[in-house]
Amino acid sequence: MKKCIYLGIPAALQNSFVAISTIVLQRVTNQYGKTVVAAATAAQRIEQLVLMPGMSLGLSVASYTGQNIGAMRIDRVKKGFWSATKIIVAFSLIMMPCMYFFAGSVMKLFTDVKEVAEIGQKAVRVTCMFYIPVGMIYVSRNVLSGAGDMKIPMIMGVSEVLCRVIFASLLTKIPAIDYMGIWWATGLNWFITGAIGTIRYATGKWKNKSVVHE
């Protein structure tokens, strides 16, 4: 007899990886003084607002996946993944040009300091190019987690920490990039971590992870 068990990675653990990577990036940011720190804080607030729908969608996908894995309906899990992906892509394609072309106006809602707004505007224009990859982090990680494929979400969490450490440390040392390496590190981190989850889903190896025999 087969029994399906939901073995998803706890949300608190996922949040811990994000918190650690944020702390690491903050240490690099602090080296550039209060103006860059203020710009990073403002840019992060904008990111949180833009990414909130993706986070909420991811939580829904995890629950949906767990229920359908339990019901042995892999076909529904696949439909859920593609539906969530379409939503993420559509939302990202709308937000990317909005944030790129109106980054200055949006930044003024968070700061009235010209220097901070200018740096923050550049930061948002970098990270907005990676909205689709970060959206796929939420979709793929939560589908895998909901299916009980715990190893890859863990690897994705570690990837978020390592990528930010490595890319931020390397890119900020390049004179032509300087402190903008902070946000390029964030974008590259999203791209690599999102790719890990998406590729894992594409392999189909998650399908039997939550199924045990009795």
Image: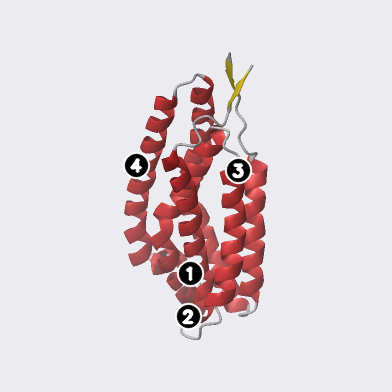
Give the image quarter of residue 34: bottom right
Q: Which of the two discs, 3 and 2, sits closer to the camera?
A: 3
Q: Is residue 151 left or right of residue 118?
A: right
Tag 1 residue: 184
Please report whichever mark, 4 or 3, sits nearer to the chain's N-terminal start.
4
Tag 4 residue: 86
Residue 151's mark? 3
Cα separation, mark 1 vs mark 3, equals 27 Å
Please report whichever mark, 1 or 2, sits nearer to the chain's N-terminal start.
2
Residue at 54% x, 61% y is 44
Please report whichever mark, 1 or 3, sits nearer to the chain's N-terminal start.
3
Cα separation, mark 1 vs mark 4, equals 25 Å
Element type at marker 3? Answer: helix
Which residue type carries mark 2?
Answer: Ile
Tag 2 residue: 177
Give the image quarter of residue 168: bottom right
Element type at marker 4? Answer: helix
Q: Are marks 1 and 2 in contact (CB under 8 Å)?
A: yes
Residue furthest to the bottom in view is: 175
Measuring from the top left, give residue 21's x and y in whole percent.
Answer: 63, 60
Crowding around mark 2 (Cα neighbors within 10 Å: few <14, some 14 to 19, many 20+) is few
Q: Is residue 8 left or right of residue 118?
A: right
Image: 61 above or below 15: above
